[in-house]
Image: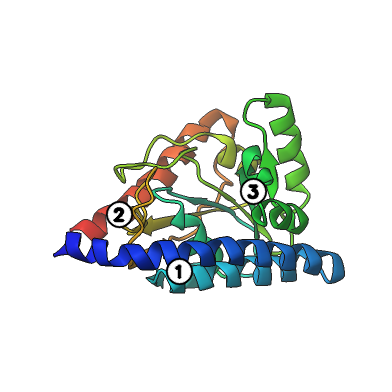
């Protein structure tokens, strides 16, 4: 039955959703760039990003449930870390996390129509992973933006997980949290792997759950025991997935 439903969904995907995604990305990217110039980056990020993400979520459609929103203090800046299973993790975070934040994005995304210019103008951070010095410089610049309730988001696995298992975490997000003395906000996303599996175009409607966990204070951590902090955050996110499976 599922194979039949997938087959029936294909005309809608190719004739409606994908053209909508392309057109909406270009339009909302231009809107974000314009609003960043006329008003400010926060307004531009919400209208050009959050609304864009929600529209694309609804057009698939994907039914998103959020738990743990009470763990967020909107006046507090965080280093947000999320697991990464699908390109649609970005839509879920942007559309439903409901805080102002900056992405850490790979440099290649700067070249994409709509996304590139919009993300640059609202202050997202592009990093050239092949140039270590340039990446460090970009992160130093980013630190100036993470104030007054504006947070920064990392996918600490560094890449998408095809099987849903949370990979080992890189240290960048945790190092920034220590440098800025900001709490880490772990977020577990469940369900997007089935909606759009990694490295495929097998898009199909479904349900996604975003679990916002309690923030982790970094006051008891330093460069010397950063691995303990990484382990604690990863275990919290793994448990978030395990509870849904049981």
**Which circle's residue, 1 or 3, is located before the other in the chain?**
1
Task: Give me the C-alpha separation between circle 3 and circle 2.
Answer: 32 Å
Write down the residue under mark 3: 112
**Residue at x 48%, y 61% (from the top left corner):** 18
Q: In the shown orientation, is residue 153 left or right of residue 87?
A: right
- At 59% from the left edge and 47% from the top edge, which residue is drawn? 219
Residue at horizontal 64 percent and vertical 48 percent from the top: 112
Callout count:
3
Q: How is the image coloured?
A: rainbow
Q: Position of residue 200 (x, y in %)?
A: 37, 46
Side of 166 where 233 appears, left or right: right
The residue that mark 2 highlights is 241
Quadrant containing the C terminus in the rendered view? bottom left
Which quadrant would the N terminus be assigned to in this image? bottom left
Q: Nearer the viewer, mark 2 or mark 1?
A: 1
Q: Are marks 3 and 2 in contact (CB under 8 Å)?
A: no
Residue 87 position within the rendered picture, expressed as x and y whole percent measured from the top left? 46, 52
Tell us which disc is closer to us: 1 or 3. 1
Indicate which disc residue 188 carries: none
The local secondary structure at tag 2 comes to helix
Name the residue carrying label 1: 16
- Name the residue located 74 percent from the left edge and 59 percent from the top edge: 122
Q: Residues within 10 Å of mark 2 (few under 14, many from 20)?
A: many
Nearer the observer: mark 3 or 2; the answer is 3
Marks 2 and 1 sit apart, C-alpha to C-alpha, by 32 Å
């Amino acid at each position: 039955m599922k194979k039949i439903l997938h087959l029936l969904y294909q005309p809608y995907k190719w004739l409606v959703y994908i053209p909508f995604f392309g057109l909406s990305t270009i339009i909302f990217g231009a809107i974000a760039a314009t609003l960043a110039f006329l008003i400010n980056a926060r307004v531009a990020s919400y209208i050009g990003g959050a609304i864009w993400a929600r529209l694309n979520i609804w057009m698939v459609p994907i039914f998103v449930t959020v738990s743990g929103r009470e763990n967020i203090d909107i006046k507090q800046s965080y280093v947000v870390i999320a697991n990464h299973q699908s390109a649609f993790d970005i839509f879920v975070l942007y559309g439903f996390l409901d805080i102002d934040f900056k992405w850490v994005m790979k440099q290649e995304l700067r070249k994409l129509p709509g996304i590139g210019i919009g993300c640059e103008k609202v202050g997202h951070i592009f990093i050239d992973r092949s140039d270590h010095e340039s990446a460090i410089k970009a992160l130093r610049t980013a630190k100036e933006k993470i104030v007054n309730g504006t947070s920064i988001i990392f996918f600490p696995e560094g890449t998408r997980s095809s099987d849903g298992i949370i990979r080992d975490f890189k240290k960048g997000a945790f190092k920034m949290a220590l440098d800025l003395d900001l709490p880490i906000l772990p977020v577990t996303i469940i369900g997007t792997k089935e909606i759009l599996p990694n490295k495929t175009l097998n898009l199909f409607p479904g349900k996604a759950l975003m679990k916002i966990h309690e923030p982790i204070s970094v006051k008891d951590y330093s460069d010397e025991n950063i691995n303990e902090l990484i382990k604690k955050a990863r275990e919290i996110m793994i448990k978030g997935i395990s509870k849904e499976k049981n």
